[in-house]
Image (cartoon, rainbow, N blue to C red):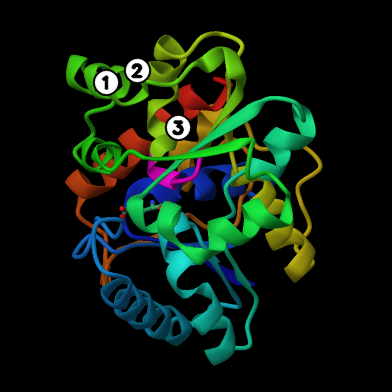
Amino acid sequence: MKVAFFDSGIGGLSVLHHALKVLPQEEFIFFADEDHVPYGTKSREEVLRFVDEAFEFLIGQGVGAIVVACNTATSVAVKEMREKYSLPIIGMEPALKLALDLFPQKKVLVTATAITITGEKILNLIEKLHAENLTELKALPRLVEFAERQEFNSAAVENYLRGELADYDFEKFSALVLGCTHFNYFKDTLRKVLPPHVKILDGNAGTINELIRRTNLQPSLIPFPVSLAPAFLQPSLIPFPVSLAPAFFYSKRRVTDSAELLRLEKFLKRLDEMEAIK
Ligand code: DGL
C-alpha cells in the first residue's frame, strides 16, 4: 500500500524518517507544502484550504493511507478530512500522555505552533488526561523558519530557545514535548538549554504505531539502520533489498532536481543525528 506523509514543510520528514526505519519495505510519498509553509502563523481557514488541496492531490496519487505528519494540520483539519474521505488518516498527537505516563507527578511543557496551542484539539486532550494543572503550552514559531532554512544549531537558534524558555522553573517539569514536527531538528540545542532531568519527547513512534495498527502493515523484524535513512534517496546504495525510495513532492511538484534532493538528504542526516537525543 502506498502511504502518504503530509506536512506544511520538512517537519514531517521526522515522522517519515521513523517510518523508513520500521517499515523499510513500504512505498511512501512525502508531500511538503513548501508553497504555503509555515502553517502555524496563518488562519485556520487558510490552513484548512491548503490541507484540503493537498489531500485531493494525494488521493489522486492512489495512496491507501495518509499520515498527517503535522500537528498544526491535524489540529485544524483532520476531523474534516476524515468526514470527507474513508481511507485511514493518521494524525499527530503531542506526546503529552506518554510524558504523564512516564512522570505522573511533574509538569510537562508542550511546545508547538500558535495554531496548535490555541486549538480545541490540544485543550480536549489536556481535559481528557485531567492534566490542566500539569501542562503548560508554549508556541515556538521561529523554529519552523530556522528548520526550513536548515539553520539547526546556530547561536541565533540557541539564543532564541534560551530567551523563550527562560521564565520556566524547570525543577517543576519532567519533560518538554515536541508538539510540532519541525522541532525535531533542534534536539541538540534543546538538550543544551534544558536541565538534564527534563526529557525531550516526540510523537513520531506513536504515530507510526497507529499507522501500523490502522493499516495492518507489517513492521520489519530488523529495524532498518537509522544511519542509512538518507540512502533511501538512492536505493542502489542500500546493502539489502528495500522496495522503493519515497517520492518527494514540494506542494504538487515532484522533486527531481539533484540540489533539492541533496537538501532533503541533509534533513534526513540531521534527523539521524537527533534520533538518539532524549
Ligand atoms: N510541522 C508543523 C507542525 O507539526 C507545522 C509548522 C508550520 O508550518 O508552522 O505543527
Amino acid at dot 1: Gly
Residue sitting nearer the eye, 210 or 60: 210
From the viewer's perspective, tell me whether residue 106 is left or right of residue 276. Answer: right
Q: Are marks 2 and 1 in contact (CB under 8 Å)?
A: yes
Mark drawn on residue 271: 3
Q: Position of residue 10 (x, y in %)?
A: 34, 49
Q: What residue sits 73% from the left and 50% below the top?
A: 129
Q: Tag 2: Cα neighbours inside 10 Å, few (<14), some, or many (≥20)?
A: few
Residue sitting nearer the eye, 52 or 250: 52
N-term mark: 2 or 3: 2
| Highlighted magenta segment, given as a residue range | 178-182
Secondary structure under the numbered disc 2 in the rendered image: loop
Q: Tag 1: Cα neighbours inside 10 Å, few (<14), some, or many (≥20)?
A: few
Q: Position of residue 179 (x, y in %)?
A: 49, 45
Amino acid at dot 2: Ala
Ligand 1 within 8 A of label 3's CB?
no
Q: What residue sits 51% from the left and 82% below the top?
A: 81
Label 2, label 1: how far apart the Cα atoms are:
5 Å
Mark drawn on residue 163: 1
Q: Which residue is mark 2?
A: 166
N-term mark: 1 or 3: 1
Q: Position of residue 144 (x, y in %)?
A: 28, 43
